[in-house]
Image (cartoon, rainbow, N blue to C red):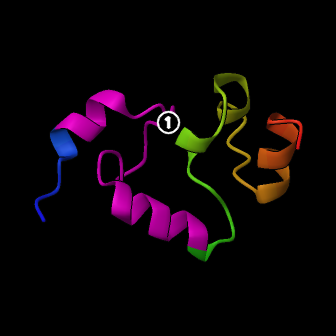
Amino acid sequence: MECKEKDNRRRCTCTYTGCDKTGVCCDCIQYHLARRELPGCCFPPEAERTYDRTFKAFARAWNL
């Protein structure tokens, strides 16, 4: 399967500009899950900007 990095970059909502995984979603997801986190694209904009990627922050952001 070919990576759609160019298309993914256009749709990526992560605001962390220093990320080397932007557009390479499989690497991003693997990175965050290994740290018991979720990628920024899983969060609403105001929560994403906090850079708190924990599952607890996810639940709080979505009122779960």
User: Residue at the location (64% across, 72% down)?
Assistant: 35
Q: Position of residue 57 (x, y in %)?
A: 82, 47
User: Residue at the location (65% across, 34% down)?
Assistant: 48
Task: Residue 16: say if magenta.
Answer: yes
Q: Position of residue 59 (x, y in %)?
A: 83, 47
Q: Which residue is mark 1?
A: 14
**Label 1 sits on what residue type?**
Cys
Q: Is residue 56 left or right of residue 6?
A: right
In the image, which residues are magenta?
7-33
Q: Secondary structure at mark 1?
A: loop
Instruction: Residue 54: name its quadrant.
Output: bottom right
User: Residue at the location (66% across, 30% down)?
Assistant: 49
Which image quarter holds the C terminus? Answer: top right
Instruction: Residue 44: name its quadrant.
Output: top right
Nearer-the-camera pick, 35 or 2: 2
Q: Is residue 16 left or right of residue 52?
A: left
Q: Is residue 13 left or right of residue 1?
A: right
Q: Is residue 11 above or below residue 41?
A: above
Task: Residue 47: say if magenta.
Answer: no
